Image: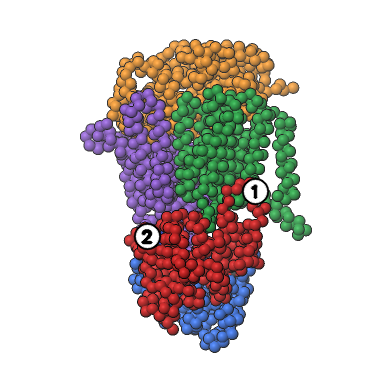
């Protein structure tokens, strides 16, 4: 392996991690802090991607598309919270799972009725569509670099909001004891709605940024949702820091597994055997990682409360 | 003197079982009132209804002349009512410091408001545990935190529901001293507590509840003079 | 059980016995076979999830492994149901013991996710087993008597009957009550001197073994097994069935499974947008029937009784 | 009298905080030993270590001469140790009798029974009813625990602890939140129990402590600063400055 | 009196990520029924549609229902091989004809071929074989190949290697349903091959092309694909980066025959989009069934007669000449196509030339049809 390949793969791991972080952050906010398992998070991600695609193709500007998607998805998220999800806060996790799974099905079908079953077109903006030469001889896709930048910025912003602002404290207080927070003067309904909007906006950012790399299609939220859950569980629920570390861990382990495992196995077992089991092993790796982390730390790496 | 809090004919219930049957209660500005009664007579329920945590089935609650009935708890809190609730209800996932500063306010623009430093001075153990999560405090420390948290909102009306429960004797005395100082500073307070002697020393007037109804009302002098009240209504 | 409940149970049992006689075609028999198999699988999850309070998101692992044991043994020439079924159930119990022993260190959502992790690992193992069909799955030729839909139906019916009776007894037994109390208040049970971990593990193992048995029946019914049987979506579906039917209600698993499958089948034959209907149904159930369908039935029943008393 | 519970050199740190600091304590068989001390002194932490839910960093705990420092909680229960919680901890959705039956069943030891319906096991229910009677909940047997008044829940809490037929009972603030009459009832209950039990009582209600205790130990900053008969403790100037203040001096 | 309808069971992937393919196949199939005037051999046609949700178990349930409850005369529609393999057993046992409009597993092409199974599309390996031959003929001799780690993926690379004899830069298997190929793309960059061949179905294929282009490799290392990885659905989702890509197919939009003109213009008119091969295969499947029903005069009771009529493949295929091999898989030409822009600037697959003429699959000799 050449050094450039190693650096490129590390960047890939970081980028995959940050990508997952965008989703996991919203999920951990809603799940950890509001104690609500929201499977429909993946649907908001999908809506964000579709809105970006639609507005981008209508206006010709990707960034306009992203902006519109963020606003649109946040509004849809808040509407969803006010109409349905609000009823679920007091319910147990299982009811939340069932109800939000129902929402996934509904949203999928609605999206399919509006946009059709085929994937829709969404490409990276012209300026970012090619590779950039970081140092002579080393090129990396510009859009993925952009993604890394956005991921870091969002992470910093979230850290600040949740850990350093009074709003962050209110949210955490409201999550642990809603009634008492109200009695202390926190306008809890409004607050949760806003937080939900923030989570939805993060989904839209993730959808808009991942859309051009992955494809924009019905059901795109489900598979990635599981990964996002893996991330927040590894990191410890409710912790933005945990989500970030968990996301990076998953990203890097997954990347390393796919990049290195076949090589290692090839040395150990020979080419044929390596291609035979390499794939399965690489797929198992992140689940193995999660199981190991939980075995060692049953509440994840950075549990927010215990 | 105007009545800061005026409760008339208050009725409340948990589901089908009615608990309050027409409670009257009035607190003037600057006054300290004790609410007494045996276990389960409806003291906490009265407080919860005033705070808007439980809907009033009947009667009327007025604060500074405004009707509170039907208002959500957060609005009532923002009008200047703060509570030290039964069972402390500390936010376990906030640190001690965060529990204190998250809700700090001075809406009535009190000239010499409560600050973090003043609360820490009142309860030194809190200062030492500043960065601990609320869930990691001993029972007594949580109680101090609950009082501190309420003071930090600089309320017009402070409600204490069994605020000395679980406190060591020294600290309990400290709380009583603190309440007298608050009173001296003009704070209006509604207190529920089981230490009748201390309450008599502190409060101006008392209301005794029996099964959700007012059984007796009167001044501290009257209560301390008539020991039969104690044994009849309070089981002392 | 009250008299009325006995009566209803009796009528349902009789109806189920008569299904092959009255069925217009094989499809009906197969559909009912399937309903019964999933009723068993969902009931086994209900033991773990509803009574034991352990939200396993990897329950399909046992369902799939049970099926694969039958499949792999059958293609290797060992077709005798006595051997394959016993081995399958034992292996699933063993698997549940292993997974449970590790997973039970965690609680809450962490437990959900670690059970999922193990199921996913197994999923990928079967995907990579190329000699047994890999991702494409493995067609199985069940031994002759089981190839007759009617015979198989009765075998399934009897199996389900036995298992439900077993579950009923377990629920009312000392063990069952201990497990339920652990769900209610774990730290208290520990303080009372219960070895909580052991109880939960045994409950988890029973659930896994029964799910494995359901998987065995399923493989025989479909004459086919694929990694899909242990995919996370299958685990999710089992969970949906239990929640839909009523968590921790004895008939919750069975009723949820039946309604879920019938709803899917029925809506699927009406429109290709059938998922919209299923989604809406789930949402409505959660919002308006917190105890699931069984809860709905019993509160409707209570209301009727009250009204009759009033009249 | 011999020491039923014997603690020596116990340490427990939470981060930088030493919650139990070289603590030594002995509770003699048959006595009611009260443990008092300021808030945050480490009383609950100490009880937790004796019950086995908190693992000490170092030191030794012996019950009747047997080293139990590293035994899991349920094994300690079987050796005759039971506790109540500072915050009421009962099975809220179960009736009083169901609560107690669970406790009786635990002591019975044969809980891996899968077949026989519990309803048919008369002796479980008889014993549960007996304990309900003993803690004064005889007439409230069929009420859901969650619907009991606070004081009654505490009584149930004690009842649950009794189901294991303990030799040593750990009571953590049993009087918390009780009015005068409820407290009086609880004090009576404890007094009755002490006839056949050894009790370690943590309580801030000094009236009750001085009424009930044979011996008192005072815990300050995780360390026992004084131990002895109630009068000696009351008179001890260190205890007065650290804990009692003028409430009891008066 | 109205004669009994011909019942055709259509099981396909109509929801979920793979649904684009199933929906196209169904549209093509329905278009053909419409062109047939809704009848075959004088009998009206009833198409009963079921969604397999890309799950073999669900497909199996649907098949049992269609076979046992609806007693369909023909079955068709399945896109994915794994679902085909699950559904095959009950279909063949009930002696119902299955006309595959896409799935072409090798199991049914060799020793496991079946008198009741007909494939009107291709055998899974064929398009890969064609690409292997083309890449080989073009003189590339250091090719990087990759595919997902499941049977169809492994068959794809085997098929490619059957006709490609040069050196392999590397052979990589990716995860099934993988979405992000950044890792593999860096491996390709590092290996510096002179061409890349990959088979990635559905969404994975779309993503691979996008990411390959974004990494700047499309301009440097040519990418070759089987036809279904570069079809109209993929073009729609990927857009501009597709321009210039080569791919292999058994059919092309501009094939000049009457049936194809009727199909392509009819499809564009009806559905306002350019048809994919799935639509084309759906169309041909319906036409094949119709030809057989006509041949037996609408009387389906004699299964041998129906089989003989199907084997004759006496229908006007949109791909021109069409014949069945002994294993009921097609003997047909395979073309090279390239994605280019038409006059109005839209991307489409242009026919470049023929790679194979009358090509047969590699398994037909093992088929005895017993
Ligand atoms: N959540 C509830 N649901 C049903 N009944 C309740 C609930 N909370 C309290 N009660 C009942 O309402 C009555 C009054 O209770 P409340 O808590 O107001 O009494 P209290 O005077 O504050 O007693 P204490 O001194 O024990 O705190 C009691 O009989 C109690 O059992
Ligand atoms: N899990 C924990 N993590 C960190 N600190 C803790 C933890 N548990 C307790 N503490 C601290 O240890 C000290 C002792 O707590 P403990 O609960 O034992 O006190 P206590 O003597 O029971 O007090 P009280 O009379 O107020 O109940 C307290 O300062 C508390 O903040
Ligand atoms: Mg109260
Ligand atoms: Mg304590």
In x, y percent, where is residue E361? Answer: 47, 15
Locate residue C36 relative to residue E272 in the image: left or right. Answer: right
Q: Residue at x 34, y 25 (%)?
A: A270
Which chain shows up in green? C
Q: Is mark 1 within 8 Å of ligand 1?
A: no
Q: Tally the marks.
A: 2
Between B98 and C13, the one lying in front of the other is C13
C-alpha gap between disc 1 and disc 2: 44 Å
Locate residue A129 relative to residue C311 in the image: left or right. Answer: left
In x, y percent, where is residue A209? Answer: 38, 41
Assign a secondary structure to mark 2. Answer: strand
Assign a secondary structure to mark 1. Answer: loop
Vertical relation: A54 (above or below) C220: below
Q: Pointer 2: residues within 10 angstroms few (<14), some, or many (20+)?
A: some
In x, y percent, where is residue C93? Answer: 53, 38
Which chain shows up in blue? B
Going by the picture, which residue comes out furthest to the right? C311
Which chain shows up in red? D
Locate residue A92 relative to residue E143 in the image: left or right. Answer: right
The answer for which chain carries disc 1 is: D
Which chain shows up in purple? A
**1 and 2 marks on the same chain:** yes
Between B107 and D51, the one lying in front of the other is D51
Q: Residue at x 49, y 11 (%)?
A: E365
Write down the residue under mark 2.
Answer: D59
**Disc 1 versus disc 2: nearer the observer:** 2
Which chain shows up in orange? E
Place residue E355 in its image quadrant: top left
Write down the residue under mark 1.
Answer: D116
Can residue D217 be seen by looking at this rendering? yes
Q: Residue at x 37, y 60 (%)?
A: D59
Vertical relation: B68 (above or below) C2: below
């Amino acid at each position: 392996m050449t050094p450039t390949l190693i650096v490129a793969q590390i960047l890939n791991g970081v980028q995959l991690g940050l990508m997952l972080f965008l989703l996991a952050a919203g999920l951990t906010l809603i799940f950890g802090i509001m104690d609500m398992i929201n499977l429909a998070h993946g649907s908001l991600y999908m809506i964000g991607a579709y809105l970006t695609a639609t507005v981008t193709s209508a206006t010709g500007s990707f960034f306009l598309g992203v902006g519109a998607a963020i606003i649109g998805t946040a509004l849809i998220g808040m509407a969803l919270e006010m109409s349905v999800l609000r009823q679920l806060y007091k319910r147990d996790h299982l009811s939340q799972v069932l109800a939000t799974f129902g929402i996934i099905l509904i949203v999928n079908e609605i999206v399919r009725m509006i946009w059709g079953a085929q994937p829709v077109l969404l490409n990276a903006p012209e300026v970012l569509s090619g590779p950039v030469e970081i140092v002579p001889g080393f090129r990396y896709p510009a859009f993925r670099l952009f993604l890394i930048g956005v991921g870091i910025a969002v992470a910093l912003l979230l850290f600040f909001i949740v850990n350093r602002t009074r709003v962050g404290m209110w949210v955490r207080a409201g999550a642990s004891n809603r009634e008492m927070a109200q009695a202390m003067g926190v306008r809890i309904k409004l607050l949760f709605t806003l937080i939900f909007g923030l989570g939805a906006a993060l989904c839209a950012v993730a959808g808009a940024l991942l859309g051009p790399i992955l494809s924009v299609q019905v059901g795109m939220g489900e598979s990635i949702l599981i990964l996002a859950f893996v991330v927040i569980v590894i990191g410890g629920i409710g912790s933005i820091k945990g989500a970030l570390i968990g996301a990076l861990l998953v990203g890097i382990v997954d990347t390393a597994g796919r990049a290195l495992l076949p090589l290692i196995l090839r040395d150990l077992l020979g080419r044929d055997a390596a291609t035979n089991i390499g794939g399965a092993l690489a797929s198992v790796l992140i689940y193995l990682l999660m199981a190991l982390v939980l075995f060692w730390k049953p509440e994840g790496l950075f549990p927010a409360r215990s | 003197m105007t009545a800061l809090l005026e409760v008339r004919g208050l009725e409340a219930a948990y589901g089908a079982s009615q608990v309050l049957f027409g409670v009257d209660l009035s607190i003037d500005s600057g006054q300290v009132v004790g609410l007494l009664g045996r276990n389960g007579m409806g003291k906490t329920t009265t407080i919860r209804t005033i705070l808007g945590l439980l809907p009033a089935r009947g009667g009327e609650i007025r604060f500074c002349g405004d009707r509170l009935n039907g208002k959500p708890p957060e609005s009532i809190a923002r009008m200047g009512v703060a509570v030290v609730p039964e069972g402390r209800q500390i936010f376990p996932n906030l640190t001690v410091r965060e529990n204190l500063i998250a809700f700090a306010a001075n809406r009535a623009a009190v000239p010499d408001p409560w600050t973090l430093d003043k609360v820490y001075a009142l309860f030194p153990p809190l200062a030492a545990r500043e960065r601990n999560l609320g869930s990691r405090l001993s029972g007594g420390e949580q109680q101090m935190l609950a009082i501190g948290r309420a003071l930090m909102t600089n309320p017009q009306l402070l409600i204490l529901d069994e605020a000395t429960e679980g406190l060591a004797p020294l600290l309990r005395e400290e709380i009583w001293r603190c309440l007298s100082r608050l009173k001296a500073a003009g704070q209006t307070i509604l207190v529920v507590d089981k230490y009748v002697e201390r309450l008599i020393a502190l409060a101006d007037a008392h209301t005794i509840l029996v099964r959700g109804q007012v059984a007796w009302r009167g001044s501290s002098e009257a209560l301390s003079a008539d020991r039969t009240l104690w044994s009849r209504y309070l089981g002392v | 059980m009250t008299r009325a409940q006995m009566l209803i149970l009796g009528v349902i049992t009789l109806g189920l016995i008569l299904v092959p006689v009255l069925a217009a075609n094989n499809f009906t028999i197969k559909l009912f076979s399937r309903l019964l198999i999933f009723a068993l699988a969902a009931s086994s999850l209900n033991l773990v999830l509803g009574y034991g309070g352990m939200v396993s998101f990897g329950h399909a692992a046992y369902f799939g492994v049970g099926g694969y044991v039958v499949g792999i043994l059958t293609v290797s020439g060992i077709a005798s149901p006595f051997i394959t079924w016993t081995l399958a159930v034992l292996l699933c119990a063993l698997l549940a013991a292993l997974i449970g022993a590790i997973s039970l260190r965690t609680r809450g959502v962490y437990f959900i996710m670690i059970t999922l992790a193990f199921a996913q690992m197994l999923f990928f193992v079967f995907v990579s087993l190329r000699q047994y069909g890999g991702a494409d799955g493995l067609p199985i030729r069940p031994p002759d008597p089981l190839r007759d839909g009617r015979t198989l139906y009765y075998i399934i019916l009897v199996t389900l009957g036995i298992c439900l009776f077993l579950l009923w007894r377990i629920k009312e037994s000392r063990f069952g009550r201990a497990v339920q109390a652990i769900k209610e208040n774990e730290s208290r049970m520990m303080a009372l001197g219960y070895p909580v971990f052991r109880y939960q593990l045994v409950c988890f193992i029973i659930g896994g073994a029964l799910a494995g048995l359901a998987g065995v029946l399923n493989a025989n019914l479909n004459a086919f097994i694929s990694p899909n049987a242990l995919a996370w979506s299958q685990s999710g579906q089992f969970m949906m069935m239990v929640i839909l039917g009523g968590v921790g209600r004895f008939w919750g698993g069975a009723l949820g499974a039946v309604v879920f499958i019938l709803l899917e089948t029925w809506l699927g034959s009406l429109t290709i947008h059938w998922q919209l209907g299923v989604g809406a149904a789930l949402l409505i159930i959660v919002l308006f029937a917190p105890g699931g369908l069984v809860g709905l039935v019993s509160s409707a029943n209570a209301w009727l009784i009250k009204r009759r008393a009033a009249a | 009298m011999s020491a039923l519970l014997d603690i020596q050199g116990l340490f427990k740190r939470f981060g930088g905080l030493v919650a139990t600091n070289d603590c030594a304590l002995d509770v003699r068989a048959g006595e009611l030993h009260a443990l008092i001390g300021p808030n945050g002194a480490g009383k609950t932490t100490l009880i937790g270590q004796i019950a086995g839910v908190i693992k000490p960093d170092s030191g030794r705990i012996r019950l009747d001469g047997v080293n139990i420092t590293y035994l899991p909680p349920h094994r300690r229960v079987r050796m005759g140790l039971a506790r109540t919680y500072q915050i009421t901890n009962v099975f809220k959705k179960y009736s009083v009798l169901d609560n107690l039956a669970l406790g009786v069943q635990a002591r019975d030891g044969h809980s891996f029974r899968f077949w026989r319906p519990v309803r048919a096991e008369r002796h479980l229910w008889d014993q549960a009813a007996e304990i309900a009677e003993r803690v004064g909940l005889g007439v409230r047997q069929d009420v859901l625990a969650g619907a009991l008044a606070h004081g009654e829940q505490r009584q149930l809490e004690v009842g649950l602890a009794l189901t294991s037929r303990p030799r040593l009972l750990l009571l953590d603030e049993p009087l918390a939140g009780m009015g005068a009459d409820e407290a009086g009832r609880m004090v009576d209950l404890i007094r009755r129990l002490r006839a056949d039990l050894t009790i370690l009582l943590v309580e801030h209600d000094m009236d009750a402590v001085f009424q009930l205790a044979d011996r008192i130990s005072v815990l300050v900053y995780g360390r026992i600063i004084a131990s002895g008969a109630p009068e000696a403790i009351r008179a001890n100037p260190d205890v007065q400055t650290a804990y009692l203040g003028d409430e009891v001096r008066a | 009196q109205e004669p009994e309808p011909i019942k055709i069971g259509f099981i396909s992937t109509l929801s979920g990520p793979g649904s684009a393919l199933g929906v196209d196949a169904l549209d093509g199939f329905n278009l053909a029924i419409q062109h047939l005037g809704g009848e075959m051999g004088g009998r009206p046609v009833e198409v009963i549609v079921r969604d397999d949700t890309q799950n073999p178990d669900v497909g199996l349930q649907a098949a049992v229902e269609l076979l046992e409850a609806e007693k369909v005369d023909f079955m068709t529609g399945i896109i994915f091989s794994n679902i085909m393999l699950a559904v095959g057993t009950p279909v063949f046992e009930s002696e119902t004809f299955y006309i595959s409009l896409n799935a072409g597993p090798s199991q049914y092409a060799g020793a496991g071929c079946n008198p009741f199974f007909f494939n009107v599309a291709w055998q899974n390996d064929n398009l890969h074989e064609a690409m292997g031959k083309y890449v080989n003929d073009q003189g590339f001799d250091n090719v990087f190949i990759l595919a997902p780690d499941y049977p169809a993926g492994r068959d794809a690379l085997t098929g490619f290697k059957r006709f490609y004899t040069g050196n392999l830069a590397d052979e990589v298997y990716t995860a099934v349903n993988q979405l992000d190929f950044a890792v593999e793309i860096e491996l390709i960059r590092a290996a510096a091959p002179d061409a890349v061949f990959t088979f990635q179905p559905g969404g994975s294929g779309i993503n691979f092309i996008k990411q390959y282009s974004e990494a700047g490799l499309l301009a440097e290392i040519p990418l070759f694909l089987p036809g279904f990885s570069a079809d109209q659905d993929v073009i729609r989702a990927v857009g501009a980066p597709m321009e210039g890509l080569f791919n292999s197919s058994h059919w092309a939009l501009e094939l000049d025959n009457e049936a194809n003109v009727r199909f392509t213009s009819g499809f564009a008119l009806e559905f306002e989009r350019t048809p994919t091969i799935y639509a084309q295969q759906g169309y041909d499947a319906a036409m094949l069934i119709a030809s057989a029903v006509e041949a037996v005069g609408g009387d389906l009771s004699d299964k041998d007669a129906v089989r003989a009529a199907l084997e004759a493949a006496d229908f006007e295929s949109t791909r021109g000449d069409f014949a069945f091999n002994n294993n009921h898989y097609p003997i047909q030409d395979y073309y090279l196509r390239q994605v280019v822009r038409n006059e109005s600037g839209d991307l489409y697959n242009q026919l470049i030339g023929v790679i194979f003429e009358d090509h047969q699959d590699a398994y037909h000799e093992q088929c005895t049809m017993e």
